Image (tube, rainbow, N blue to C red):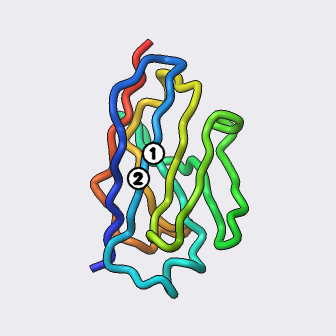
């Protein structure tokens, strides 16, 4: 079964940094590599929102709320996607998930990121 597995979340003070990772288990390279992958997040009481995307050629796009602070990257050999988060704010507190840009994969458990003020 194809399953994203997220890791790397935690508790950090405002202004700090975290790097979260996602490895997609059960997927073959020829299927993973062409995908535009994405990070999403869901804060308590809110809908899941798109945070960043990265294409097969590593072109990236970001939500306005994280532009200039977050960086998405990928490692195709490891079927993995990463999100470097700098200058974190309390409003970045959420569970972070990865999926492709059209949400074809199963949802993983996500990784909790909590930013204290």
Find numbered disc 2 in the image and state the secondary structure of the residue it sits on: strand
Identity of the residue furthest to the bottom in this view: 30
Q: Mark 2 highlights which residue?
A: 97
Whether 59 is drawn above or below 9: the answer is below
Identity of the residue furthest to the front in this view: 77
Asked which quadrant contains residue 115, the reply is top left
Whether 3 is drawn above or below 6: the answer is below
Find numbered disc 1 in the image and state the secondary structure of the residue it sits on: strand
Q: Position of residue 11 (x, y in %)?
A: 34, 26
Name the quadrant of the C terminus: top left
| Mark 2–mark 1 distance (CA, rounded to whole Å) | 6 Å
Asked if marks 2 and 1 touch (Cβ < 8 Å), the reply is: yes
Give me the residue at 33% from left, 72% from top: 25
Q: Mark 1 highlights which residue?
A: 41
Q: Could you classify mark 1 by the number of other residues whose Cα lies within 10 Å: few (under 14), some (14-19), or many (20 or more)?
A: many
Give me the residue at 68% from left, 64% from top: 58
Image-based side of 47 in relation to 53, left or right: left
Q: Nearer the viewer, residue 84 or 36?
A: 84
Q: Position of residue 12 (x, y in %)?
A: 40, 23
Image-based side of 56 in relation to 75, left or right: right
Q: Could you classify mark 2 by the number of other residues whose Cα lies within 10 Å: few (under 14), some (14-19), or many (20 or more)?
A: many
């Amino acid at each position: 079964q194809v399953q994203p597995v997220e890791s790397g979340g935690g508790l950090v003070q405002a202004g700090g940094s975290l790097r979260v990772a996602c490895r997609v288990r059960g997927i073959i390279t020829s299927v993973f590599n062409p995908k535009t992958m994405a990070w999403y997040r869901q804060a308590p009481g809110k809908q899941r929102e798109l945070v960043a995307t990265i294409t097969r050629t590593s072109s990236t796009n970001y939500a306005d709320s994280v532009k200039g602070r977050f960086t998405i990257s990928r490692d195709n050999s490891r079927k993995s996607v990463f999100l470097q988060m700098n200058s974190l704010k309390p409003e970045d507190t959420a569970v972070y998930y990865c999926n492709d840009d059209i949400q074809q994969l199963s949802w993983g458990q996500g990784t909790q990121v909590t930013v204290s003020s």
